[in-house]
Image: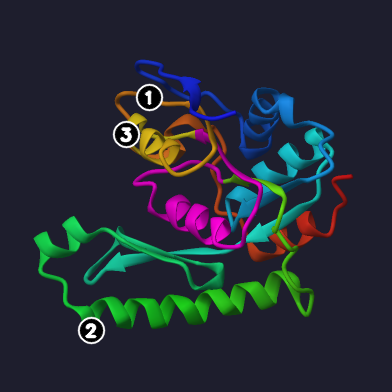
């Protein structure tokens, strides 16, 4: 199975009550993967973990956390110039870096800073438990949405480097352009909503609170199978 699946909806307002409802809807669209012996769901921390838990529970699959950290533009941290993923995978938006005149030293500084935070979170969420081996597995990467797509792209490339049998991207919402780009990298992409007037992930959620470390730990400790 390959390609891009989703719905382009004009003027999309609030669609999901919260991340868990979004996960339930995604799980319905991923029903063909249910009960596969090789299936593994990875929730991108932090917002992707509540969505991922619902997906994993519905598909009868194990859940683990996957860490991705945005590399923010200096003096404008909300704008991503790239992303860093568990395992050291890095994606850089070369066009943005060139247009803003961002130097290699600034990229390295951001990478070093976010690597430290990534390691802190991995320790906080897993403790001494190593990540689940993805080799030979069908991996579903879940987040609560994508904006530029840089974080999910870094996750896809990092997971593909570990020799899974397939990589699937599943998100409740994202702009059509980013979902199409990911469809060129992943084996399957499910983007439930692709509003043409996309502004932010939170625009389709009634409850889009910031997920805490404690919430992530609690979900990871709650069995999905």
Name the residue tied to disc 1: 195
Dot placed on the residue nearer the N-terminal end, 1 or 3: 3
Report whether 7 appears left or right of 196: right
Q: Quadrant of the N terminus?
A: top right
Name the residue tied to disc 3: 177
For numbered disc 2, what is the local secondary structure?
helix
> In the picture, residue 46 is in which quadrant?
bottom right
Residue pictured at 65% horizontal, 65% vertical: 213
Q: Is residue 2 above or below residue 121?
A: above
Residue pictured at 56% horizontal, 48% vertical: 209
- Per the model, the C-alpha gap separating discs 2 and 3 is 30 Å
Dot placed on the residue nearer the N-terminal end, 2 or 3: 2
For numbered disc 3, what is the local secondary structure?
helix
Dot placed on the residue nearer the N-terminal end, 1 or 2: 2
- Per the model, the C-alpha gap separating discs 1 and 2 is 37 Å
Pick whichever, 109 or 31, lies toward us.
Answer: 31
- Relative image position of residue 189 (x, y in whole percent): 52, 34
- Per the model, the C-alpha gap separating discs 1 and 3 is 11 Å
Q: Is residue 224 above or below residue 112?
A: above
Residue pictured at 79% horizontal, 45% vertical: 38
Kindly identify which numbered label has been placed on residue 105: 2
Please give the count of numbered marks on the rendered protein: 3
Crowding at mark 3 (Cα within 10 Å: few <14, some 14-19, many 20+): some
- Relative image position of residue 129 (x, y in whole percent): 79, 74
Residue pictured at 51% horizontal, 52% vertical: 156
Crowding at mark 2 (Cα within 10 Å: few <14, some 14-19, many 20+): few
Q: Is residue 201 above or below residue 4?
A: below
Q: Residue furthest top?
A: 10
> In the picture, residue 30 is in which quadrant?
top right
Crowding at mark 1 (Cα within 10 Å: few <14, some 14-19, many 20+): many
Magenta stretch bounds: 143-172
Q: Quadrant of the C terminus?
A: top right
């Amino acid at each position: 199975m390959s390609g891009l699946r989703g719905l382009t909806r004009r003027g999309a307002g609030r669609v999901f009550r919260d991340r868990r409802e979004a996960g339930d809807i995604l799980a319905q669209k991923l029903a063909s993967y249910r009960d596969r012996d090789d299936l593994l769901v990875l929730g991108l921390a932090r917002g992707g973990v509540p969505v991922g838990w619902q997906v994993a529970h519905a598909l009868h699959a194990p859940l683990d956390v996957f860490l991705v950290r945005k590399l923010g533009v200096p003096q404008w941290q909300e704008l991503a110039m790239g992303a860093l993923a568990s395992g050291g995978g890095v994606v850089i938006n070369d066009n943005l870096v060139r247009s803003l005149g961002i130097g290699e030293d600034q990229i390295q500084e951001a990478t070093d800073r976010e690597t430290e935070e990534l390691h802190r979170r991995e320790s906080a969420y897993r403790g001494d438990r190593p990540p689940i081996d993805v080799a030979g597995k069908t991996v579903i990467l879940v987040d609560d949405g994508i904006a530029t797509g840089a974080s999910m792209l870094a996750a896809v490339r990092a997971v593909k480097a570990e020799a899974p049998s397939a990589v699937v991207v599943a998100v409740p919402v994202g702009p059509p352009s980013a979902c199409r780009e990911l469809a060129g990298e992943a084996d399957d992409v499910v983007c439930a909503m692709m509003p043409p007037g996309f502004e932010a992930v939170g625009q389709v959620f009634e409850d889009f609170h910031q997920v805490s470390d404690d919430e992530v730990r609690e979900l990871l400790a709650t069995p999905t199978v």
